[in-house]
Image (cartoon, rainbow, N blue to C red):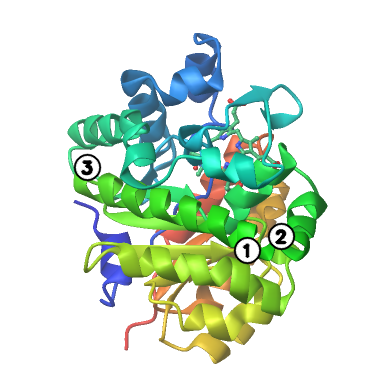
């Protein structure tokens, strides 16, 4: 087995960092688009054990990345709690109704009962592991409570998530009740993912950056911490709180194994602040992959040498859907041919 990712997370020395890309499954591969074209909806694909396992493994076969990530979406939790969504072309996910008041929050499912409704993901994980035959580790994931709260209040994507933020000030106690419920489902969901065979879990807090320091600590990190503390002993975990630099000290204090960063801070700043307290994942601007091969190589190597050991190479956010495949390949291959200086 290629254990690079696990070795780095376990604090062992490796000859180079592992590399994978957020949102590597789907989006960029023609093989994915072919599978997707044969099915009527994204949700049908997520719930189809055979096809979801197939598209999870495609980037391992095609790009040679050092990890697979389960093909699913963060929105399966709101759906299991009782809010249905559809993916609308050129718009993204749209919920048929949103949370507006206390009664809506009362109606939301919680804990094991809601997590049980996502049983198709646990089946997909088992199927992936049968087919992966231990070639690379498997990453499971979820959305952080704050990011899921954003979609549940807003009903769709947004630049500001102002409806969700407004609710925090108007109804702080109700907000916490909803975040409590999401957290209880998430702990049960990730625990089931681990029992089904994922080696690592990543928590995506994509909208962390719309909250200020105090509000993010109170309504964001409190719940991420509770999730991490609720996971089985020894779980390897990565937290991606996009844009939450004002809470960097609090992020470093979380009981997780690794922190993932976007490209708004340099490797030097991050390593100086974090040292070896956490493994660091990131943080190439996804737009670098549109550059010429020599640009991709130079930008990638600059990050590799700046972070040195205890690093997982990745983008600073998900790979964009129209990224040229050759650019992605060149990035992966640059990392794979890199070697740390021997000590
Ligand atoms: O076929 C299609 O058109 C569907 C597009 C798509 C895909 C391929 C969506 C809808 N979700 C996914 C899969 C997905 N989503 C994965 C699995 C595999 C992989 O890593 O490639 C993962 C990890 C996610 C995570 C996700 N979904 C996040 C967090 C990461 C991030 O990019 O910030 C978020 C915010 C979502 C919500 C979502 N789901 C889909 C879309 C288009 C969006 C974004 C909506 C928005 O812009 O607000």
Q: Which residue is mark 3?
A: 196
The percent coordinates of residue 153 (x first, y second) are 70, 45
Determine the CA span between mark 2 and mark 1: 6 Å
Up-down relation of residue 320 to residue 211 (above or below): above
How far from the left and from the top, in percent, is residue 221? 54, 71
Give how far across and how far down residue 242 sits, in percent. Answer: 63, 63
As drawn, 330 above or below 202: above
Quadrant (top left, top right, bottom left, bottom right) of the C terminus: bottom left
Q: Which residue is mark 2?
A: 171
Please state the horizontal and vertical placement of residue 156, each as a whole percent of the image: 72, 37
Dot 3 crowding, Cα within 10 Å, few <14, some 14–19, many 20+ = some
Q: Secondary structure at mark 1?
A: helix
- 286 left or right of 311? right
Confirm or deny contact between disc 2 and disc 1 (CB under 8 A): yes
Residue at the spot x=49%, y=58% of the render?
A: 180
Q: For mark 1, what is the residue?
A: 173
Q: Nearer the viewer, mark 2 or mark 3?
A: 2
């Amino acid at each position: 087995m290629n254990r690079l990712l696990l070795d780095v997370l376990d604090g062992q020395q490796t000859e180079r960092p592992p590399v994978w890309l957020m949102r590597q499954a789907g989006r960029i591969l023609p093989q994915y688009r072919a599978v997707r074209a044969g099915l009527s909806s994204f949700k049908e694909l997520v719930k189809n054990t055979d096809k979801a396992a197939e598209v999870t493994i495609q980037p391992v076969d095609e790009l040679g990345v050092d990890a697979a990530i389960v093909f699913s979406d963060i929105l399966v939790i709101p759906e299991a709690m009782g809010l249905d969504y559809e993916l609308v072309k050129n718009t993204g996910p749209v919920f048929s109704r949103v949370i507006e008041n206390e009664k809506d929050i009362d109606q939301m499912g919680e804990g094991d009962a809601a997590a049980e409704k996502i049983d198709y993901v646990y089946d997909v994980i088992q199927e992936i592991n049968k087919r992966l035959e231990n070639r690379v580790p498997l990453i499971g994931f979820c959305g952080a409570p704050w990011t899921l709260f954003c979609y549940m209040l807003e009903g769709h994507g947004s630049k500001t998530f102002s409806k969700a933020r407004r609710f925090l000030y108007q109804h702080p106690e109700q907000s916490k009740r909803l975040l409590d419920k999401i957290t209880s489902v998430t702990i049960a969901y990730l625990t089931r993912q681990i029992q089904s065979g994922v080696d690592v879990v990543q928590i995506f807090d994509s909208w962390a950056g719309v909250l200020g320091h105090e509000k993010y600590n109170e309504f964001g990190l409190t719940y991420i911490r509770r999730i991490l503390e609720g996971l089985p002993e020894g779980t390897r975990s990565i937290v991606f709180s996009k844009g939450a630099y004002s809470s960097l000290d609090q992020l470093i204090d979380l009981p997780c194994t690794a922190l993932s960063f976007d490209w708004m801070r340099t490797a030097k700043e991050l390593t100086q602040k974090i040292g070896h307290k956490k493994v660091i994942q990131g943080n190439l601007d996804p737009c670098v992959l549109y550059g010429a091969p020599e640009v991709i190589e130079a930008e990638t190597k600059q990050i590799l040498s700046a972070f040195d050991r205890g690093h997982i190479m990745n983008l600073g956010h998900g790979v964009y859907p129209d990224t040229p495949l050759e650019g992605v390949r060149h990035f992966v291959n640059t990392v794979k041919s890199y070697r740390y200086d021997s000590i």
